[in-house]
Image: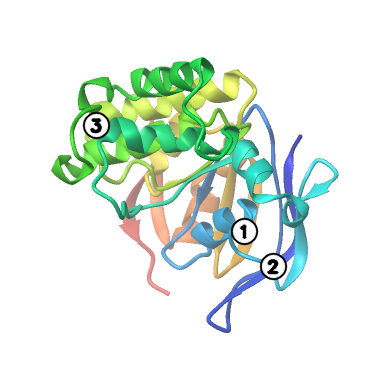
Amino acid sequence: MDLIARDLTVSLGGRPVLHGVDVALRRGRVTAILGPNGAGKSSLLKAAAGLLPPRTGTVTLGDRGIGTMGERERAQTIGYLPQDATVHWNLHAGDLVALGRLPYRARFAAPSQDDRAAIAAAMAATETGDLSDRPVASLSGGERARVLLARVLAGRPRWLLADEPLASLDPAHQIDLLDRLRGLAAEGVGVAVVLHDLAQAARIADDVVLMRDGRVAAAGTAAEILSPEMIAAVFDVTVARLPESRIVVPVGRIAR
C-alpha cells in the first residue's frame, strides 16, 4: 500500500509550513526528500507518520486515513526516525532497542521469542550488538543514532520514515545505513528519507521529491528529478554531473 498525501496543508504555531502538498510515496521503493533549509521536508515526514495533523487535506495508506488508525496499529505500520532524537532515560542500549517491540506486546508482558529475535536482528543490522549493555548517555552521537535506528527496525514496520539519518554517522556507517535502507525496500518496505547530500540521494533513491517553500517543486524517479536544471532551480546552485553516473555535485552559488 502506498502512502499518499493529497492537498496537504500543515501549520506549526499558526504558521503554514506545508501548502497544498500532493505526493505519493511508493511501497518497496526508496524516496529521497530533498530541499533547502525550511522547505518543509521534516514537516512532510511527520505528517506522513501521523504526528502532525493536517489543517486541510489527507494522508492515506491504501484506503485508510492515517488519522483513523489507533496508536498501536500506526506504530506497527510506520516506523519514524526523527533527527536528533532525545532519549529521556539513560537506558542500556539493548533496552532502548527493545522499546521498538512495545506495539506488539501486552502491557507488562515479558518479551516473546519473536520479540527477542526482532531485537537481535535489528542490532545485528546496525552493528550495535556490542553496545547492548552500555548506557545511552555513554554513547557517541553516531553510536546513539545507530541504536535509535535499531529501535525502529525492531518494530519491523511496513514503512520507515527517516529524517536526516546520516547526520551523526561516519562515512562507513553512512554507507551501511543506506545499504540497509535499500535492503528494506527490496523486501517490500516503503522507505522515505530526508537527505541533504545529493550524491547519497543519487546513490540510494528510486524516487525523489524536491521541496521548496513548503511546496513540492518536482517529484518523480531519481533519473528524472536529479538533473542539473532541477537541482539548480530548487537549491540556487550550479551543479555538475559526474561522468557516467546520475550523481550531481554542487559547484557554485546562483545569486537571486
Q: Amino acid at mark 2?
A: Pro
Residue 170 image offset from top left, x and y in percent: 22, 35
Q: Which residue is mark 3?
A: 171
Which badge, 3 or 1, comes first in the chain's sequence? 1
Residue 60 image offset from top left, x and y in percent: 77, 49
Which badge, 1 or 2, comes first in the chain's sequence? 1
Q: Dot 2: within a 10 Å radius of its alpha carbon, few (fewer than 14), some, or many (20 or more) residues? A: some
Which badge, 3 or 2, comes first in the chain's sequence? 2
Q: Residue lying furthest right in this view?
A: 63
Contact? badges 1 and 2 (CB < 8 Å):
yes
How far, Cα to Cα, is label 3 from label 1? Answer: 30 Å
Q: Is residue 229 left or right of residue 188?
A: left
Q: Indicate which disc residue 54 carries.
A: 2
Residue at the image point whose x is 73% and y is 57% from the top: 67
Q: Is residue 102 left or right of residue 166?
A: right
Q: Indicate which disc residue 114 carries.
A: none
- Looking at the image, is 253 positioned above or below residue 200? below
Residue at the image point whose x is 18% and y is 46% from the top: 137
Element assignment for label 1? helix
- Looking at the image, is 29 positioned above or below residue 62? above
Residue at the image point whose x is 73% and y is 52% from the top: 66
The quarter of the displayed image where residue 116 is located: top left
In which quadrant is the N terminus drawn?
Answer: top right
- Quick one: 188 or 246, which is closer to the camera? 188
- Quick one: 183 or 68, which is closer to the camera? 68
In which quadrant is the C terminus drawn?
Answer: bottom left
The quarter of the displayed image where residue 145 is located: top left
Q: Amino acid at mark 1?
A: Ala
Residue 154 image offset from top left, x and y in percent: 47, 28
Q: Which residue is mark 1?
A: 47
